[in-house]
Image (cartoon, rainbow, N blue to C red):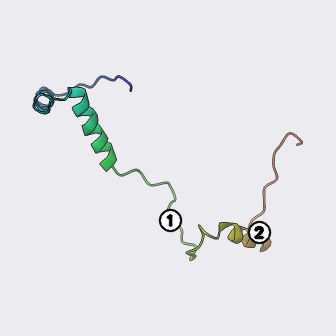
Amino acid sequence: MTKTTVYLQSDLAVTVRELATREGRSQAEIIRDALTEYTRRRKRPAIPGLGEFDSGRTDTATGAKELLKQAASEGKFRRRRSRGAGR
């Protein structure tokens, strides 16, 4: 665990202290549980570009190798040459 300092408004600090006493737990445990629940509920930001394009295909995940091979044979993209030590 990592130690951190959090500044709370007085009324919130009293509430946490009372809750900890009532439940027989430490204030730190109450705060950890609250933060865990809060972060679990937060929606993670979407990956940029995800869902913005529609290929019209539904099998891209399962047939990726075949789709890439087909696109390469049709000249839709070229394979990059490696920029290894030989260049």
Which of these two is toward me, 73 or 63?
63
- Describe residue 80's horizontal placement relative to residue 36 as left or right: right
Q: Amino acid at mark 1?
A: Glu
Which of these two is toward me, 18 or 48?
18
Label 1: how many residues lie within 10 Å, few (<14), some (14-19) or many (20+)? few
| Residue 63 percent location from the top left of the image | 64, 70
Q: Residue at x 50, y 55 (%)?
A: 48
Task: Give the total number of marks visible in the rendering.
Answer: 2
Which of these two is toward me, 84 or 32?
32
Circle on res. 72: 2
| Residue 82 percent location from the top left of the image | 81, 49
Q: Report which quarter residue 86 is drawn in.
A: top right
Query: Vertical placement of 11 versus 37: above or below?
Result: above
- Describe residue 34's horizontal placement relative to residue 51 as left or right: left
Report the residue marked by disc 1. 52
Q: Amino acid at mark 2?
A: Ala
Query: Vertical placement of 6 versus 49: above or below?
Result: above
**Element type where label 1 sits in the image:** loop
Q: Report which quarter residue 33 is drawn in.
A: top left
Q: Which residue extends farthest front? A: 24
**Element type where label 2 sits in the image:** helix
Q: Report which quarter residue 59 is drawn in.
A: bottom right
Q: Residue at x 10, y 32 (%)?
A: 22
